[in-house]
Amino acid sequence: MIDTAGPEPAARVEQVRLVVGVIVGAFGVHGEAKLRLTTDDPEHLKTIRRIWIGDEPRPRKLLAMRFHAGQALVRISGVTTPEQVDALRGEPVRIAGADARPPEPGEYFLYQLIGLRAENEAGVPLGVLTDVMETGAHDVFVITPEGGGPDLLLPNHPQYVLDVQPEAGRIVVRPIEYD
């Protein structure tokens, strides 16, 4: 399931903070932090100059960033020792939505999908998209039936997710058929 609660689905991207990674530990002895990335555009992070850690109300300066072994190594204002990094272990790192790379046509931020009504190709209601599981290969959409019953899990893949219409409040999916 998503590690942290996201913004309200109807919020404009300029008004939100988006999680781009989680601090997983210190790197070296000078306060550099290892960041497990949760963004699909890590290179864009090199343009970011301010971040929020956890629920801190004020941003911190992102002093430096580089990539190493599939993670980002970051230097953050006010963090100069491994012990200070360890105190932040497990905290999500957020950026201002206005600083995010704008989505291409047909792309959406995950938070914008929560709450969409899911229906099949014939227009039959299946439930509401209530969560997204980030699995590595494909995100998995969790659709909760309105009348109860087990959740429907669908990979976010064009074979199963046919049309996404956040403006209309709906998503059209093809449920997996098991023999």
Image (cartoon, rainbow, N blue to C red):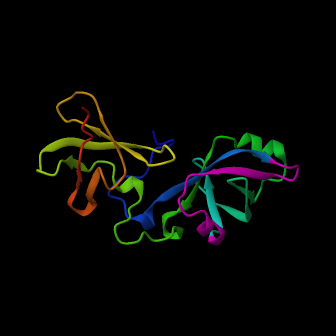
Residue at image position (51%, 47%) is 136
Between residues 168 and 61, which one lies in front from this camera angle? Answer: 168
Is residue 7 shown above or below 42? Answer: above
In terms of depth relative to the viewer, which is nearer, 158 or 165?
158
In the rendered view of the protein, which quadrant contains the C terminus?
A: top left
Say which residue appears at 50% left-offset and 57% top-offset.
Answer: 18
Image vertical order of residue 69 relative to residue 103, above or below: above
Residue 120, horizontal then vertical, whole percent: 17, 48
With 12 as the anchor, is 83 left or right in this view? right
Q: Residue at x 77, y 56 (%)?
A: 78
Seen in the picture, residue 47 relative to 169 is either above or below; the reply is below
Along the viewing direction, whichever of 128 and 58 lies nearer the viewer: 128
Quadrant of the rendered structure where residue 126 is? top left
Residue 146 picture location, percent across and down: 19, 36
Q: Which residue is drawn at 47% across and 42% down?
A: 2
Q: Position of residue 26 (x, y in %)?
A: 78, 46
Left or right: 30, with 47 as reference point: right
Side of 92 where 27 appears, left or right:
right
Q: Does the magenta stretch include residue 44?
A: yes
Query: In which quarter of the view is residue 89 placed?
Result: top right
Q: Would residue 147 be counted in the magenta stretch?
A: no
* Residue that extends furthest to the front in the rendered view of this protein: 179
Q: Which quadrant, please, contains the N terminus?
A: top left
Give the residues drawn in magenta, as a range. 27-47
Q: Where in the figure is residue 149, as x and y percent of width and height?
A: 23, 27
